[in-house]
Image (spheres, helix red, strand yellow):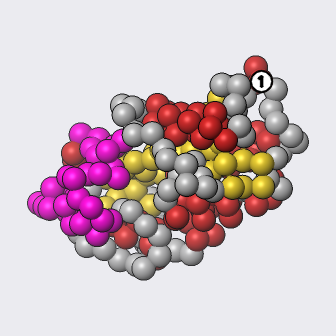
Amino acid sequence: MRVVVATGNAGKVREIAEALGGLGWQLEGLGGLPLPEETGTTYEENAALKACAAAVTRGLPALADDSGLEVAALNGQPGVYSARFGNRASDTERNLYLLEKLRGAADRRARFVSVVILAYPDGHLETYRGELTGTLLEGPRGENGFGYDPLFVPDGETRTLAEMTVAEKRAISHRGRALAALIEAHRNGPPAREEAGGE
């Protein structure tokens, strides 16, 4: 099956392509297609905006993800606004802004949430969700990953996501878990329409 990956984030494209390799899908990039502005207030809404736009324009199934970091001490912020937190332009700047917001905070619990949507040109949607809980450090560690990975230590781990290999991160990450649910649903071909989707 040919599937468009509806994201401009090279890190996400790489993770998704490697995670879905076993399905035998032919994954394609956006090919210059602009994505709609993420105006939704939930991960589901934003992922659907991107996936549906790509599916309709390209006439192919399209996969999109929306994800975010929810910090307990910040009442769940930045959440769906993680990619533009504090209007900072880069991952490094957003990490520094987050650390400043958390200065002196005793509670450093956080969770990553990812919602993956597979949209078809006829409007049918499949929705998959994954979460990863952990704590935030007071400074970044690691050179791998992207986003808030250098600050996030998953529960039961001593390393940040940025200190793990791509395969190690995918095995436990929020996006990895959402994609694992998609893979399970498609292991024997596309799921029946009335049973599509999953947590």
**Where does residue 4 sit, x and y in percent of width and height?**
67, 48
Q: Would you say residue 114 is visible in this rendering?
A: no
Q: Residue at x 88, y 42 (%)?
A: 188
Q: Is residue 92 left or right of residue 176?
A: left
Q: Would you say residue 186 is visible in this rendering?
A: yes
Per the image, is 80 magenta?
A: yes
Q: Hey, which residue is sitting farthest top in the picture?
A: 194
Per the image, is 160 magenta?
A: no
Q: Residue 40, located in which quarter of the rendered image?
A: top left
**84 over 137 or under it: above or below:** above
Residue nearest the viewer, comparing 162 with 121: 121
Q: Is residue 24 left or right of residue 58?
A: right
Q: Hey, which residue is sitting farthest right in the picture?
A: 188
Q: Is residue 85 left or right of residue 43?
A: left
**143 over 2 or under it: above or below:** below
Q: Hey, which residue is sitting farthest bottom in the picture?
A: 143
**Where does residue 196 sit, x and y in percent of width and height?**
72, 28
Question: Main SS type for the magenta part?
Answer: helix
Q: Residue at x 82, y 36 (%)?
A: 190
**Where does residue 106 sit, x and y in percent of width and height?**
18, 56
Residue at the disc numbered 1: 193
Q: Secondary structure at mark 1?
A: helix
Which residues fall within the magenta stretch?
75-104
Q: Residue at x 48, y 51 (%)?
A: 132
